[in-house]
Amino acid sequence: METIAGPPVCLVTGGNRGIGREVCRRLAARGATVLPTARAPEAGSGLLTLDVTDAPGVVRAAEEVRSRFGRLDVLVNNAAITYDTWQRASTADLDVVREAAETNLYGPWRTVQAFLPLLRASGHGRIVNVSSEAASLTNMGGGTPAYTASKTALNALTRMLAAELRPDRILVNAICPGWVATDMGGPGGRPVADGAAGIVWAALLPDDGPTGGFFRDGRPLPW
């Protein structure tokens, strides 16, 4: 990221565990001011309350960041739910699909809308949407339909925002962390640190970095 006034201010949704927590740790190690968020943080945890499904709560969180910092340099949309391995598209419970979309698509969307004035105030804004290779139309199968459909839509949102916000010098990218050993991913995946690295890369891109892309480990993935 190019030089800005003071350390970059970075907000990470779902920053209390797994990949989100590791992203926060790595950004802090790079000198950033990090604002990890959680839906219902414990008292004294230092986490900012932000439930991406609660529209008024998202607005309140944006107002808190505005009052404390006046800008936001990096927004990492990491919070996600429902890796529905038990479902197939032809028989999926659509209530489960709607619930997944509320967090995985509408959540990042409303969060971007609420924080966009602060990202514009940065002059070097970065939006990182944590996606999945499951959302690649090129290689898509029939499993995890709620998760896959919501992440595919998130990729579409990434492309639209990247095109719209390019004049504001805001870079918007979708990042697949890979199969990571987390509560959602389960055992057997790659280390959390490896999954977080590509997200941090996208968060700290220079001004001439890519926008509107889909990446894992800094390398493009097929849409």
Image (cartoon, grey):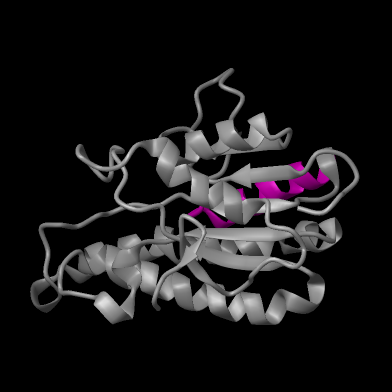
Please state if 168 lies on the left or on the right of 48 as rendered: right
Residue 131, horizontal then vertical, whole percent = 42, 61
Whether residue 98 appears in this view of the structure is no
Q: Determine if the magenta segment contains residue 12.
A: no
Residue sitting at x 64%, y 75%? 162
Q: Nearer the viewer, residue 50 or 73?
A: 73
Quick one: which residue is furthest to the front in this view? 219
- Residue 200 vertical position relative to residue 101 in the rendered view, above or below: above
Residue sitting at x 16%, y 67%? 143
Whether residue 208 appears in this view of the structure is yes
Residue sitting at x 56%, y 21%? 45
Part of the protein shown in magenta: 51-67
Q: Nearer the viewer, residue 49 or 70?
A: 70
Please state if 20 lies on the left or on the right of 178 as rendered: right
Q: Main secondary structure of the magenta part?
A: helix
Q: Determine if the magenta segment contains residue 63.
A: yes
Quarter-of-image position of residue 202? bottom right
Q: Nearer the viewer, residue 53 or 133?
A: 133
Residue 8, horizontal then vertical, whole percent = 77, 43
